[in-house]
Image (cartoon, rainbow, N blue to C red):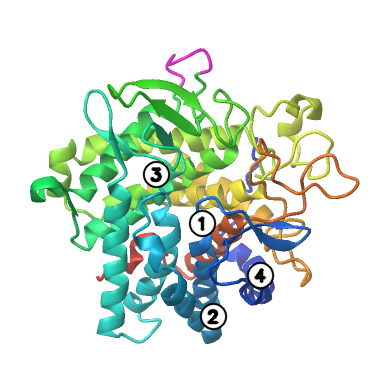
Amino acid sequence: MIQSDPKLTAADLVPAIQKLWAASAPKILSIDKDEVPGKATPVFTIAGKYTARGWTEWTQGFVYGSAVLQYDATGDESFLELGRDRTRERMAHHITHIGVHDHGFNNVSTYGNLLRLMVEGKIPFDAREKDFYELALKCTGAVQAARWTRVAGGGGYIYSFNGPHSLFADTIRSLRALAVSHSLGHVLMGEKDARISLLERLIQHARTTADFAVYYGEGRDAYDIRGRVAHESIFNTNDGNFRCPNSQQGYSPFTTWTRGLAWIIAGYPEQLEWLATLDDAELVPFGGRQEIEAIFLKAAKAACDFYIEQTPTDGIPYWDTGAPNIHHLGDYLDRPAQIENNWEPVDSSSASIAAQGLIRLGRYLGNSADGTRYMQAGLSTARTVLSEPYLSTSAEHQGLILHSIYHRPNGWDHTPAGSKIPRGESSMWGDYHARELALYIQRLAENKDYTFFGCLSR
């Protein structure tokens, strides 16, 4: 169980964050130097060098978004130029990519961050440039929303790249694409010029995810433990009925892959923050604010509680809470995560993602007991993941946050000589979310805020 420091503040982490940005800069430049336009996107490191595995190119926005975050945090304009140029040159096809559920990852991380900087006055206002970013964001939300499967009893979900039968827990964090597109006044146009509300699809997807991907200890099945998350939910596309849980990257449908858990932890609190910016009248047709926020909050709290309870004391989880050999580690929840062991790897990328969600939920709940609990767990996890031995300061390693796991079942992760498990490597999503986490905490220390919807004109 995470042992939170009750006195830890955002300001206390500023020295570690400054060290992170210093380590981050040369790594961004090194990756850009090695990247070949038109080739598969950098995904994860092998022996310290970023390599590609062409699957869906879901990490390209993290590559260039990292440069934009670097500029935001440090003011180094060379990174603004890099992020802006690469977004313009290489990201257009992601806007209209009909084969993925990752629009929020790729396009809000690039076009969204650039628009946010303009809205915040951190880059000069240019009407045509602003229109360019807004058009990209309008389109990406609509394209993602078009990947739609209806479920029995009403509602539906954005289906994963596995096909119309498949809902991924990951997509809750990618709903930011629909949120921004809706707030910019956009809709999805369907047959006979039907106007399809992006807000409605966002809410319906989040409801379906809460109903079927997140568990609440209410007797749904024999493995119904509150806060457990199924990576994938399978539906019968003929009648829309739920069939079973599944897992693509976890150990089994009935264990919890911790990165899937982390996406839930980060996604729902972000959406709660965004919902608070909408008028009550917008939410009435979809159940009303009280009902919608209760669903989102129930899922967020369950997942956060499970993470706190099922993670080692320092906030770094193992790759799956039910990994087959984890029992060999003994009382592993009563001590810090063991990077070097003979049985199961840790996954720092899950911690990078989850820490931000914990902090956001803590801020959302304010000075309540739950709010304080989540805030301190998030800050304590961030302190671990943003510091050595997880922070990589070596110029020889292109990764920023070490000990990330990509796809354990497929055996894609690098196992160094002398080790029995993968360790010592980084992932593009882990590095990006560590930078996003660092920027968020940095802003909190300055009594400022950072949200994905900060790109909207105010």
Residue type at mark 3: give it.
Tyr
- Near-viewer residue (442 or 124): 124
Asked if residue 7 lies left or right of residue 326, the reply is left
Residue type at mark 1: give it.
Glu
Outermost residue toward the right in this view: 418
Whole-Å distance between the Cαs marked 4 and 2? 21 Å
Quadrant in the rendering for residue 319: top right
Q: Position of residue 163 (x, y in %)?
A: 40, 37
Whole-Å distance between the Cαs marked 3 and 2? 30 Å
Q: Which residue is mark 4?
A: 15
Tell me if mark 2 has few (under 14), some (14-19) or many (20+) residues whose alpha carbon lies within 10 angstroms of its own: many
Residue type at mark 2: give it.
Phe
Q: Which residues are magenta?
A: 217-223
Q: Which residue is mark 3?
A: 268
Q: Assign the magenta stretch its main secondary structure.
A: loop
SS under mark 1: loop
- Report the quarter where the C terminus lies: bottom left
SS under mark 4: helix
Q: Earlier in the sequence, mark 3 or mark 4?
A: 4
